[in-house]
Structures are given as C-alpha cells and as structure tokens.
Amino acid sequence: MRAPALLMLCALAAFVAEASEGRATSDFEIAAMNRQLETSRDAFSRIAAHMNLGDLQAGRGNQTAARSHYETARTLAEEEMGSARKSSALRRYARAASWAGLSAAKLGRGGEAHRLLEEALRYDSDSTGSWNVYASAMTVLEKHTHSVAAARNAVTIASRSAGDSVPDALDLNIYRYALASALSRTETASAGSEAETLLGQIVLALSDRQFDSLRRKVARDEQFEIFSSTRTDSSAYLSLLNRTRLRLAKIYEESGRAEDARLQYRAVLADRIDDPAALAGMARLASGDEQHRYFAESFDASPFSLALVRQYESFLSEREVSPSTRRGNGATVQRAIEEASRNRHQNALDLLQTLEASHPDNSTLRYLIIRSHINSAEFARAREQLERRGLPAEIAGELRKDLALAEKAASRVPSFFNVARTNEPLRLSPDDLSLLVARIRTGTLTPEQLALVDTLHFVAPVAFEDVTSRDAETTTFQAGSLYDQRFRFSSPATFTGRFEAGTPHELEFQILGISETDGRETLLLQPWRVSS
Amino acid sequence: MINPLRLASFAILATIAVAELSASPFAQSVAVGWNRHDAQAIVARGGANRSIAAYGNGGSELLWSASGPAEPALVVVSNDGSRSVVLDTINDLAFLIATKDGTQRRISTAASPVAAVFYGNELFILCRDGRELQRVSADGNVKTLAVAPDTTFMRKGKDAIYVYSRLEGTVTEVDPSSLTAVRTQVFASAASDLEIDGRSGYLTIPSAGVVIVFSLAELKERERLSVGTIPLDLSVVSDGGVLDAGSLAVADPSSRRVWMSEKSQSGAAAFGRGFLRGLIGLGLYAPRSSEYPTGVDRVWAETWGLAAYDSSSGTLYLVSKGKATKVASDVPAGAIALTGRGVTWWNSATNRLELAEIRH
C-alpha cells in the first residue's frame, strides 16, 4: 500500500488548518524544512516540505512567501501525477492528486481542490491517507460537514485495518485527531462533545507504554519541532501530542474549565517552552502581571501572529498596561498595538513602518498599518495599501469593510452643527460625541466647526471618578466618564452640593479638546454646573 | 458564436487539429450535459463567468443563458429532455432547470450532492457527505432517506434506484415511490464505478483487478471477472442476446487499454479466454482492446462506438473499430457529454462547444 514514512506524511496534513494560529518560533522548523528540501529527491518529501514551509510562513504573516510554497507544492504534485500515470503507478498518482488538491485548497482554489481530491478517491477510496488529506483540505476551505464525513471515513477504515504496531496506533490517532478537529469546527453541542472525547482518548493513548520508544527517541534527539506534515514516527508523535493538547485546552477554555485548560497548556509548554499558542492560552487565562508576561512571551515567540494580535487587542480593550520596554520584533508589534489602543495611531504607524522595512511582505504588519491609516482618517493611504497584492482575501475583505464604515462615519458630522443655536445647552448624544471625538482626533474639523465647538455648551450624563475633596456644602471632582469616554477638568472643580462618585449626574460643560492622561485618551472639559 | 466540429467520417476525424488548452483540466470549472430528446447541450460554467446555458441546433445555437453555481460538477438531463439539474458538489447546491427556457430553482442540498437521477416527475439527489438520498417532488417537497457512509454511486433501474457505498461495499435497492431501502447486499468496498443494465449490475474493484457482476433481480453476486490490472471505469456496450452475453468496455489505466469483455461467463470460459490477471497486457480480443499513450480511466459506450478519456491529461479519444483517435486534450471530465452520434465538450480556451461525431 504505502511506505510508512509517506503515510505519516499524508496523515499529518490534518494539522495544516491550524498553522495560522501562529507558530512562530518557527525558525527551527523553517531551517529543518529547508534542509529537507536540500537533501531530499523524493517528490513527496519535497511537496511536504513546501507545504510545511507555506504553513510556517502563513503563521508568520508572510502570505506572499506562503503562496509561493503552496504554488510550488501544487506544481510538484501535478508533475508527480503525470509521472505516476506514465509509469502506471496508480496509487502514487492518487496520492499526488491528494496533495495537489490540498495545495490548491491552501491557495483558495476550492473547485480545483475538490476535483483533484475526488480524483484521488476515485482511484483509492480505501486509502486512509486520501480521506485524511481530503478532510484537511475541506477544513481549509471551511467545508466542515464535508471535512467531518471524510475524517470519519479515515477513522473507520483505519479502525478496521489497524494492527498492534506503533505506526498503526499512531495513524489511527492521527485520523481521530483530524476528526476531532473537524468536529470542533461544526459548532454543534454533540459534535463538540464528541471532539472532546476523541481528544481525550488520543492524549490517553499517546501516554501508553506502547509509545515509550518514540518518547525516548524524541528525548534522545532533542526533538521539539512541530510540523503540519511529518515524515517520521517520532516527529508525528510530537506534533500530534502538541496539537491534541492545544485543541483540548481550547475546548476546556471555551467551556469555562480554566484549570483543565491550564493543565494542557502547561503540558505543551513543558515540551516546548516557547510554544506561542500555549503562551497565548496561558495569557488569556491569567490575570494581572502574569497575563502581561505571558502575552510578552507569546509575542516574542510569535511576533506576527494575527490571532495573537487580535487577542492582545481584546485584552487591551478591557485594561491598561504599562508600555512594553523590551526589544525585538514581538515587543515592537506589541507596543504598536498598545499605541493604537490609546489612539496614538501615528506612533503606532511609526513603529510598524520601521518593522515593515525589514518584513516588506508581512500581511500582519500590513493589516495593522492599514488599520492605523483608517483610524487616522488617512483613507487614501489605506486604500493604496489595500490595493497592493498579497493580503489574504478574508483580511482584505475585513479591512475594506472597516474602511467603508470609517469613510461613511467621516462623512457624517455631529448633528449640533446643523441645528439653530439657542442659549440653552445642547444635549450631547453618544453618537455626536463619538463623531466629534473622531474628528478632533483626526484633525478633520474645519476652522469654522472648531470655532463653533469652542462656543457651545453641552449637557450630558456623566459619572465622576473619586471625590477629590468634600465639605458639608461642596464636592470637588477632577475626572470621570462621559458615556464611554474618559474626561477630566483642567483643574479640580468644586460643585455646590453633595454628589457621589460613580453615580450618574447631569453635567453642563464645554469641550476644550483631547489630551492624554496616564497613556489614555481623555476629553478635556470646562464644567459649568452639575445636577443629580 | 458556436462552431461545432462536425465530422463526415471517422477517417476525417483523425486528421483534425486538437484544441490545446492552457489550463489544467482540474482547474476548469465546467460541466456539460446532453439533452438527447431535443439535441441540446446544457453547459454550466463556474468561476467568474458562472452561468448555465442551453445550445440547440446540435449545439450550434445559444438558446438561453441564466445564472449558475460557482462550481458546477455534474449536469443531468431527464429522459424527456424537459428538465436538467446542475450539481455544485462542494457548495451543496442543485440548480433545477426547465430546459425549454432556463427557468431555474435553486435547491440547498445536504453535504456533497454527487449524483442525481430523474425518476418520473421526481428528482433524486444523492448527498454523499450528508449521507442522504433526497427526493425532490415537482411541488418542491423534499423527503430524505438515510444512506450508508461514502455512498457515491447511484443508478436508475427499471423499477428501482441502486446506490453503492464505497466504505461499506454495499449496494442498496431503493423503491423510488416510497423512498425506502428495499434490500441491501454487501459486495466489496472501494469500487470505482457502478453500472447497471436491464438484468445485471457491475462494480469495478480496482484494488482486486475484478469486475463484480451481480443480478439485479436477486441482488446477489453472479461472478467476478478478472479484467486487466486495475479496472477503473466501465460501460455497458451491448445488452446481449440469446447466443451472446453482451459486452462491457472496461478502462484500465494501468494497462493503457480499454478491455472489451463479455458480460458474463463461466470460470472455465474466462480462463480459456484469458481473463486472468496473469495475462495482463496481452489484451483480450486483441484487435478490439485499444491502446492509449497515456492510459485512459474513463470510458463511455454508445451504439456508434466508444469514447475514452484520460483524467490526468484531460485527453479525449473516440474509438471505432478498435482504433482510438485523440480528439481533444486539457478537457475536464465533467465537460464531456455523449451525443447520439459522438461526443460534445466545452473548449475553455475558445469558449466554444465542440462536437465530434462518427459517421460510418
């Protein structure tokens, strides 16, 4: 049927779908795959090396390099199809068609991928490898029902024919993993439960004494590299255990079982201390300084992981951090995100553009740069960057949507610019406040509008922060929040009456501008009166 | 503008220039069906130009064009020519078309609609990954029957529909009126093709190098024919009569031949005629077992002869009197349909429907 090494190589394609989660301490893996390319003449080893390199580069945000590797893999696989047919090696033809299909899926060519994968199955429908690659490709194409069906077929066939050997046991668990991975994406409760059961079974199975020799080999060779496609049993074992634990941890995390998730993440980190996905997981589950430390380590391990960037942005939206002072690519990306979260988009841009000079095709950097342009109302520059090739379609689509929304918002002006002025203070709505702040921030108010804002008195509900001082008849405050926007007065303001911090009060005020306090964007207000 | 290729004779056919396309056959998203009743081609094209169109007058005249699926995989036309269905397997869609004017109804199917047949007024769609056989009534009502995993092939019999699961190796006879599984029989897993004629069913088992012949009446295996090295695709050439069993054409890419085989024979007769794998390459009925430079893995039989096809290169051959002639290359498998007198296919390089016919 199939040489064991190639079986593993086929089988572990199931891991590819997760490569984009960010494997970026990936220098070792990249070096190993480049060595494989240099030393191997076998077509499937070369195809697998290019697929691995594509995944590794995609995980680092280097989409152009990733596509180039996938294209090369696609070409090699097609050549292998022709060569196999000429020599009437039809299982080899089917295997090459599978790989051509997977590489086409990676390139986003769903129809072509599907036709190639079906061709492989027409020749070799009892091949676990063909079904496994099929499942992986369907996961890449987000056809999860198709992926589950294909992965289930692989498990069924492998269960029927599995012997007691280590490679057989490893294969079966690889197919179980692919099934669990596909199930966990279908978002039904029963599928999630089945996925968790399968993953638990795999972890248990891999701890069996049967795999002692593989564990010894991993330890003896000091192996730690994780690949999407592997050639040896020990490498397959290591990668399978890593991915199974990560996926299991994610399931635990999403279902609120934080301690179980931590256990799995810690187990991953015990094998590899800089695993970025495990570090990011630990960061999500940690609090305070520990959380920030894990994020920092995760960025050091995987500077350009978009998944990590999004997690960190989410983290910053809920809390303040002191600026990162470390050096290196990860720290710079982290600092840029922190600057952007404080609406200091020009600072963020400066940092990102410095990095872009040495990583010109990095899609994560481009994503962040375009976002900074959009948030700075530099729409033409954002569009110019968007028109450059190389951004993954889903990211480009997301940015185009953001750009359209920002342009639409920028074309609107606060409603108070269009109403007749009276002596009464204007009630400031959250929408008007948001529009005004955005225009002040981006410097897009006309001189006439600026002059008008200087004269207007507004009224809106506020909540004061801590009482600065108080006596029997007065209360003094200096800061608070207006809707979601933090504000402060230029100096402490004393109001007649007893007012409490944290409860809503009506404040009449003028807007003086935007400043920064403790690294946060803050409205500067001139207070006039307050009422309960 | 359609410029059908009409061939006055097979001899002329052999001299025509073959259209060379640039795209790999697997990269082209196109499916073609032939409406025998009205001699029309139904062409579904995906990608940027996604459309479904009908070409009449033997394929030379555009009759109508309508929107179509992103990835058409298969076109099936009803026997009376009034309806067609275009399946988009990867996107789980079926487009049911009124052939006269292109009026269409879009049906969301279960996962992976891989085969369809019209049976009376109803349409049956086999959804492999959804493990369902769906029956779509004329009023749009959909009923389903659960099927075994990896049920990939479906054939229409006189009074029944037959489906085959590659994973379980089972053929199930389905009563179309009640949509129930009447009986199921295990034959062998991993067949690459299922065909039926009036009395028998045939499963090609490439890994075993055999064609399993089974009785439709009893749903029981009748015999196993050893044909070639890796029999991958099969077509019934003739039903046979009182004195002969009829014949099958079997595509064997490993031997680079299409084997012509009697449909049924005793073991002794098979041995005597060289149906054993040990005689691979010698050919059966040598003059009629055509050889192909790249091997062929699909074959279609018609009264006028055979069409054979190599998926890896997209090369299409016509076979008559035991001689194969290449008529096109880089054609995707789904873009080929048999007409009453030859084959038609969509040429993606020229965006034209081509037609090659044999006139003896």
Image (tube, helix red, strand yellow):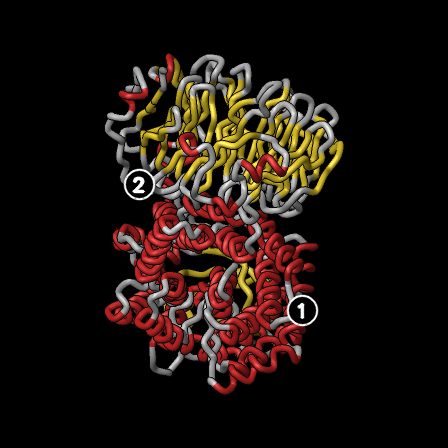
B241 or A493, which lies in front? B241
Helix, strand or loop for disc 2: loop
Mark 1 touching mark 2, by CB under 8 A? Answer: no
Could you say which is closer to the camera, residue A428 or residue B61?
B61
Depth order, front residue of A28/A375 = A28
Q: Position of residue A78 (x, y in %)?
A: 35, 51
Q: CA distance from mark 1 to mark 2?
A: 46 Å
Instruction: Let me know if residue A492 appears in the view.
Output: no
Q: State left or right for residue B103 relative to residue B159.
A: left
Chain containing the residue with disc 1? A
Work out which quarter of the rendered image holds the N terminus of chain B and state it. Answer: top left
How packed mark 2 is, by other alpha carbons closer than 10 Å (few <14, some 14-19, many 20 or more), is few
Secondary structure type for disc 1? helix
> What residue is drawn where x is 41% and y is 22%?
B53
- The amino acid beneath tag 1 is Gly
Residue found at x 45% / y 50%:
A90
Query: From what the image shows, is residue B88 above or below residue A227?
Result: above
Q: How many badges with numbers are in the image?
A: 2
Residue A226 in the image: above or below residue B119:
below
Disc 2 marks which amino acid? Ala
